[in-house]
């Protein structure tokens, strides 16, 4: 269903319906407010640009990299975070050290709707909460950017490992079950009858008493 409101009017209505206390500048098509996430309080800016064709959101994190010696580590942390993001990216203002997260989306011919705004904003807040902890570990915890980002994405790594194990088990062919052959009972061994003396012709000379129990005559 097409939205007959302008994109900025849709943003204002979204804030009213969700009880978001904000400052709206209709001339600049700008909305500003603060909201508390799970990790920190963020300053948020929404604006409509490019002749009402683009919605842009900027979220300022409540920490600044003012120490110039620390900024290379913050830049590496941000670069590692951006590498894994599917939507949006982090920025570092080199003039004052402000760290922000930026995300945008085209408005489209049908206009904006609450679902699009809510999904985009929810994704941005979750992303900021996840990587705010990583930035704090680097700035104040002494962690390396690599370790800090790995800890921030630990749940993602666990899901990837679980998915790999599941796919590997599904792709691995199951060998056919071969029934074990029944063991035959061992045949009883035939007892070799002990030959009797004198029963094997040609081996002894019975006349001389060989092979018999009778001793020869004259002995």
Image: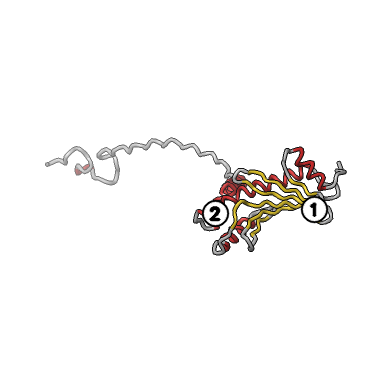
Q: Position of residue 123 (x, y in %)?
A: 68, 47
Residue 28, label in figure: 1
Residue 139 position (above or below residue 120): below
Residue at the image point whose x is 63% and y is 57% from the top: 98
- Local packing at callout 1 (Cα closer than 10 Å; few below 14, some 14-19, many 20+) is few
Residue at the image point whose x is 80% and y is 43% from the top: 113
Q: How many marks?
A: 2
Q: Residue at label 2?
A: 148
Is label 1 in a helix, a strand or a loop? loop
**Nearest to the observer: residue 78 or residue 136:** 136
Q: Position of residue 70 (x, y in %)?
A: 55, 61
**Nearest to the observer: residue 81 or residue 16:** 16
Q: Are marks 1 and 2 in contact (CB under 8 Å)?
A: no
| Residue 21 visible within the image | yes
Q: In the rendered view of the protein, which quadrant contains the N terminus?
A: top right
Q: Position of residue 36 (x, y in %)?
A: 64, 43
């Amino acid at each position: 269903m097409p939205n007959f409101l302008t994109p900025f009017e849709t943003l204002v209505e979204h804030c009213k319906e969700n009880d978001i206390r904000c400052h709206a500048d209709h001339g600049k098509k700008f909305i500003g407010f603060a909201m508390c996430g799970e990790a920190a309080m963020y300053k948020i800016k929404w604006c409509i640009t490019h002749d009402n064709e683009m919605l842009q959101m900027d979220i300022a994190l409540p920490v600044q990299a003012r120490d110039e010696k620390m900024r290379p580590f913050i830049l590496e942390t941000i670069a590692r975070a951006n590498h894994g993001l599917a939507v949006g990216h982090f920025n570092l203002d080199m003039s004052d050290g402000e760290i922000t997260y930026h995300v945008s989306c085209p408005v489209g011919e049908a206009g904006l709707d609450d679902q699009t705004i809510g999904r985009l904003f929810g994704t941005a807040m979750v992303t900021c909460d996840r990587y705010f902890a990583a930035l704090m570990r680097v700035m104040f915890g002494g962690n390396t950017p690599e370790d800090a980002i790995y800890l921030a994405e630990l749940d993602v790594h666990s899901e990837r490992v679980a998915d790999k194990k599941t796919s590997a088990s599904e792709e691995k062919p199951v060998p056919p079950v071969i029934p074990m052959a029944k063991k035959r009972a061992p045949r009883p061994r035939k007892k070799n009858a002990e030959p009797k003396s004198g029963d094997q012709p040609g081996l002894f000379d019975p006349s001389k008493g060989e092979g018999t129990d009778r001793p020869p005559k004259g002995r």
